[in-house]
Image (cartoon, helix red, strand yellow):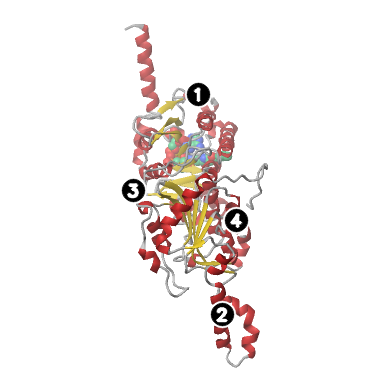
Amino acid sequence: MSSQLEKVKELIELRAEARLGGGQKAIDKQHERGKYTARERIAQLLDEGSFEELDMFVRHRCTNFGQEKKSYLGDGVVTGYGTIDGRLVYIFAQDFTVFGGSLSETMALKICKIMDMAMKMGAPVIGLNDSGGARIQEGINALAGYAEIFQRNIMASGVIPQISAILGPCAGGAVYSPALTDFTIMAKGISYMFLTGPKVVKTVTGEDVSQEALGGAEVHSNKSGVCHFAAEDGEHALKIIRKLFGFIPQNNLEEPPLVPCTDPIDRLEDSLNEIIPDSPNRPYDMYEVIGAIIDNGEFLEVSRDYAKNIIIGFARFNGQSVGIVANQPKYLAGVLDSNASRKAARFVRFCDAFNIPLVTLVDVPGFLPGTGQEYNGVILHGAKLLYAYGEATVPKVTVTLRKSYGGSHIVMGCKQLRGDMNYAWPTAEIAVMGGAGAVEVLYAKEAKASDNPAQVLADREAEYNKLFCNPYNAARYGYIDDVIEPRNTRFRIIRALQQLATKKVVNPAKKHGNIPL
Ligand code: HXC
């Protein structure tokens, strides 16, 4: 064999060794845990054969605790680039078979390298997390590595989309990288995220809690809102990422992909003319409205199980990607509270950062009153949503279906927050507050002094409703651009979006605003 051939053979052997990560035994153990390896996950996620791996020959540099005798090619992360539906993405997948995927100095360098490349090329970064946290043997070098990654997450925010899948442990300060990214997907049963694990919790607070109950996928999608998509398993998590990519652009200078539309743009949806119940206190399901107006009923909901009183997610109108924000009358009557405000505000900002128009469907009775909300800072959280809408420069189309009262009317993409096209259904009630509450404030004394207080209040309420609880009062002042037939909503939104395609609005130059965090 020529010496060149020998060198080629050596390369092939080294590559094979690198592909085994921490070795066959560790791979088998990973499978026994119900998890795929880093390379298997990358193969599942990217277009077939598109992955180009980088830094396969990197090894850690640590000599503490005899680490120099134990090192693996590629260290604990697989990095590189490939495509999803033909579009370039950068990816890192932590390899749990190598020191439990724990983050070393060199692992951080590998991750930072592809993050820097992604920024240069204007392409998204996907992180597949499965790690025991900072590599304990490396001490401060591992911490510095995390900080380098966080800094890049911050600089990339709003420039390129960043997506995190949690497919195993993600604990300690390591959770902050996913938290800084745009979307976090957790796989049920195998993933958990927490700042301090159950043992530390027990020591510090005495609380007994399992990993799942402390930071499993269900907890973070229902209670904390940290997780945007709870996947059934690891494979499902990767499918969600592929689906999500269909709605978002490569970077903040590009438009989201336009897909051919097979759903007629002028499709009339007669059911919408009868969807609003006669009684203002009866709910209906906003999902039915969304499903009826978007292309082919295809809706990718974000944070489905968190703050269900507001619905957010991606859909298309005539093939154009939009972000939908909609109150859900079926849950807490669609009231806005702290969690709903935060949930929607972050989504509005994502859409605005990445040139995705906003379609807002309004049926909101107001902000949830009470000490629970006030002590929780609903003023600041509501202001976040207000800020997000007011700051957004993407096309904004708002349709008011029924209630739109008080502060919540303003917050939900009203005209004065630079709503571009504001439509209302004939059933819309746009006012400072509902009739019953208003007459209590205005006419309680008059009613008390009369022989028939109930009649006085009923008469006054009817008068109030006639004057204010309709769309025409707002339309009279131009706060509503048109009152539309509900069944024609899809067509009117599409026409509005077509008209707004060339919209250009630039906010004043500044270092950055001071959103009420
Ligand atoms: C070095 C680690 C490691 C770590 C796991 N391993 N975590 N090596 N540093 N942080 C190694 C284990 O020693 C083991 O090596 C292999 O990975 C697999 O781990 P197991 O414990 O056998 O797996 P499992 O039973 O599934 O448990 C997984 C685990 C557990 C729950 C993640 O390993 C664990 O608790 N690890 C420590 C977690 C932790 O406290 N990390 C530091 C958090 S603080 P062998 O050779 O036996 O196969 C932190 C600060 C970050 O991260 C701050 C950023 C700002």
Name which of mark 2 and mark 3 comes first in the sequence. 3
Q: Quadrant of residue 72?
A: top left
- Residues under labels 2 and 4: Cα distance? 29 Å
Q: Residue at x 39, y 69 (%)?
A: 274
Q: Amino acid at mark 2?
A: Glu
Q: Position of residue 308 (x, y in %)?
A: 47, 60
- Residues under labels 2 and 1: Cα distance? 83 Å
Q: Quadrant of residue 238?
A: top left
Considering the numbered disc 2 on the image, is that residue within a helix, a strand or a loop? helix
Q: Is residue 74 above or below residue 277?
A: above
Q: Are marks 3 and 1 in contact (CB under 8 Å)?
A: no
Residue receiving disc 4: 417
Considering the numbered disc 3 on the image, is that residue within a helix, a strand or a loop? loop
Q: Nearer the viewer, residue 409 or 102?
A: 409
* Disc 3 residue crowd, few under 14, some 14–19, many 20+, Cα 10 Å: few
Name which of mark 2 and mark 4 comes first in the sequence. 4
Q: Amino acid at mark 3?
A: Thr
* Disc 4 residue crowd, few under 14, some 14–19, many 20+, Cα 10 Å: some
Name which of mark 4 and mark 1 comes first in the sequence. 1
Q: Residue at x 33, y 48 (%)?
A: 262
Q: Nearer the viewer, residue 396 or 66?
A: 396
Q: Amino acid at mark 1?
A: Glu
Q: Amino acid at mark 4?
A: Leu
- Quarter of the figure that contains the N terminus: top left
Q: Is residue 167 above or below residue 98?
A: below
- Residues under labels 4 and 1: Cα distance? 60 Å
Residue receiving disc 2: 463
Residue receiving disc 1: 68
The answer to whether residue 19 is left or right of residue 515 is: left
